[in-house]
Image (spheres, grey):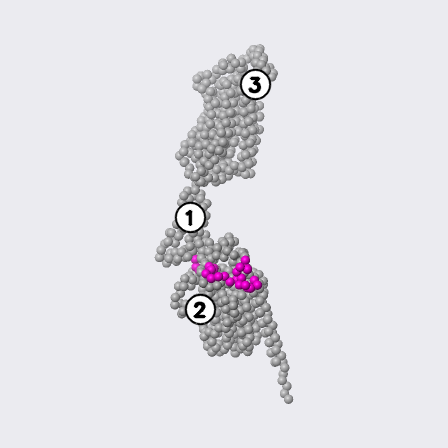
Amino acid sequence: MCKIPLWPWLAIAWRQLVVLVLLQFICASAVQSSGSRTNDGSPGPGTGSSTGSRESAGSGGSGSAFQLGANKPTMAAIEDSLQTIHDIATENLGTLCLTKLFRPLQITLNPERYAGARQKADLAAVVLQDVGVARHNGLLDALAKGLLSDVHVTSARILSINISDGIVTNSVWWNKPASAMGGPIRIEEDGIAVGRIPDPSYPWFEDESSSPGLRSPKFAPSPLNISFKGWWTYPYYSCSHKRWILSYSVAIPPMGRHGLRGFLSIDIDISDLQVNQCNNPNKLEIMSYNQHLRQYYPFVRNSKPTEEEQYSQIEAFHGSHKCHVHSMRCVYRPVTMNVATAVNLNYNHYSNTSSYTNGSSGAGPAIISKNLRVISGWKRGAYECKCKDGFYSGPHPQGFNGSIMEVAYQEYRENISSFFMDSFVCLRCAPGCATCTGPDPCLASYNWVFRTTLLTFSVMCAGFTIVLALYMYQHRKIKVFKVASPIFLTITLLGCAFMYLEMAAIFPILDTYSCIATKWTRHMGFCVTYTALLMKTWRVSLTYRVKSAHKVKLTDKQLLQWMVPILLVMFIYLGTWTLSAPPTAEKIVDQNGLIFKQCSYNWWDHSLAIGEVLFLAWGIRVCYNVRNAESLYNEARLISYAIYNIALVNTTMVAFHLFFFPQAGPDIKYLLGFIRTQLSTSVTIALVFGPKILRILRGQGDQWDQRARKRGITASFSLNGIGLVPEETADLYQENEELKKFRNSLLKLNL
């Protein structure tokens, strides 16, 4: 009796048990992958988490980490691929689709979206390598059907090939039906028939004997730092199935040197991907895409996440648009087309599933009626070229269609026409226009002849004040100047010259530096002029209101000690303003909507304006107190008139700016500034210095004002407060008598 060894049978039983466990794992993982699917059918966050350690180290978990390194497609390859897409979208292939059933592109895709399907294919290849591809015919069908359980896989095939002659000894090919109804369909094709060599025209097949390791031009290079068991093909169009496909193929080595080797391949339908030729989409472009999508599907609830939008677009085509980059921006517009068949969409996209479901419990897809417009992303020129801000196109204000731009660019490259560079362009807006619809100007025009005339007159006035100061210095010993404090008269003239220079500061197109000069000349000139006049008037007020018979002497030195702190406060304020927050030129519009620049107004201006108003109010009060005072050459009254005039002119011009000309153009504002300067500064010079110059010209500069003496004005009440000039000797007795009489007259007036 012979003994039969049990260990071979135990080994076979153990191998069968391992196969059953792996099959259950494949089916379970397929169900899990289907359950974690997102609304658009792309894998959820958990799908790619089972990627091997080598793959996760290279991918980084994001679509942007997919890199081809040195194998990045060239511009020529991208253009050829776009031309192929255009021929297929426009059905321009003709007989080419009969003689050549597959139309591959020359660009690569990011396969990370289909990592789950690839992992299942690698696992199935490991099982077949372990058990062999010829011993278990039923196993091949089970594995192929298991691969179809992935949501992305549409076809799965397994071949058993003789090593010696390359003839197919066994093959299975299962397709997922186009509709969601029914189960997988087994395909019998002559290209993989038993007893024949596989058709080499298949994009997914390559004979390993002629291409060891499947390193064939049919297959795309693997991404950097990522190791696959098999190889991804380039995307290709199947003329028989009328769709775009991406295949993954794995060569299964034989168990020994001789015998059979296997070949496993899966097809993934990538027709739902989008050929976005614009730059890498940002959040605004995705929002625009979703808004465009809702025009045809009003019941779409949620917009696509950024990551899923990235996955659904072919990265190789980003930036291949034909918009002029310096003047245009590319806006992606998904292509739509009419269909006459029912379309299946995931029910999660709709806001009201009960109105669109097919009567199931809510877990099934929604069936949409016929003739809907659906998204089809595989088309060249699915974008619009819109003019950037600062550019416009008169004939095409809404932008240029991307398809037209593609054709125009191709004709331009082939020297057929020059419309791409001549007609399909955006022109630059007029200077100063942020946006525009035509060549109309946006900046207000400056009448430089008019402005130059006003500036010349203002500069001449400033020069005249300097000449007048020199003239006064030359005649400083004449009584009409000597009794009026020449030092304060000189300060007044310097302040007036400073105010005249404001017209030079606001003459050009304003910027930060001219605005700083404007603030300094306006406010510092006003402070110098007004303070000098006010100090002289204040001295008259103190002398006039004295209740004693003794003389009140306020020398120029004492008044300067009061004047310097006032000027110092203004200097510190303007200096702090300039260093901490310098005024800038801001854009405003006139009544015609034209833009020009004006110095900004903020709390620095408002605070200073309040201080100047209070200063003016105090000066007006001082002038009111000396309204009845008599002084030599009537100077106190003339200075009061000048101060009244300064207050009235500045108040009136502010009202003009705010109420009468709120949107005046730059030339009108310059004219108003000129009028304000002349009415305040020139009138002040005319009132204070005009009578004195006339007396000198008439030869009366050294004569006392006899009318003032008749009215009881002594030398003690001259504006300088220092008494008579040294050339005259005063009679003390007579002067005391005059003071007593004047004091009595003051008492009567007060009563």
Q: Magenta-highlighted stretch: main secondary structure?
A: loop
Nearest the eye: 207 or 471: 207
Looking at the rendering, the stretch of residues picked out in magenta corresponds to: 352-381
**What residue sits right under mark 3 in the picture?**
544
Residue 694 is situated, as x and y percent measured from the top left of the image, at 45, 19
Residue 154 is situated, as x and y percent measured from the top left of the image, at 51, 68
Secondary structure of the residue carrying tag 3 is helix
**What residue sits right under mark 2 in the picture?**
240
Residue 223 is situated, as x and y percent measured from the top left of the image, at 52, 63
Secondary structure of the residue carrying tag 1 is strand
Nearer-N-terminus badge (3/1):
1
Residue displayed at 54% across by 74% down: 140
Secondary structure of the residue carrying tag 2 is loop
Which amino acid type corresponds to the residue marked 2 in the rendered image? Ser
The answer to whether 89 is drawn above or below residue 682 in the figure is: below
**Left or right: 460 in relation to 623:** left
Q: CA distance from mark 2 to mark 3?
A: 115 Å
Could you classify mark 1 by the number of other residues whose Cα lies within 10 Å: few (under 14), some (14-19), or many (20 or more)?
A: many
Q: CA distance from mark 3 to mark 1?
A: 73 Å
Say if the magenta span includes residue 373. yes
Residue displayed at 43% across by 17% down: 698
Nearer-N-terminus badge (2/3):
2
**What residue sits right under mark 1 in the picture?**
392
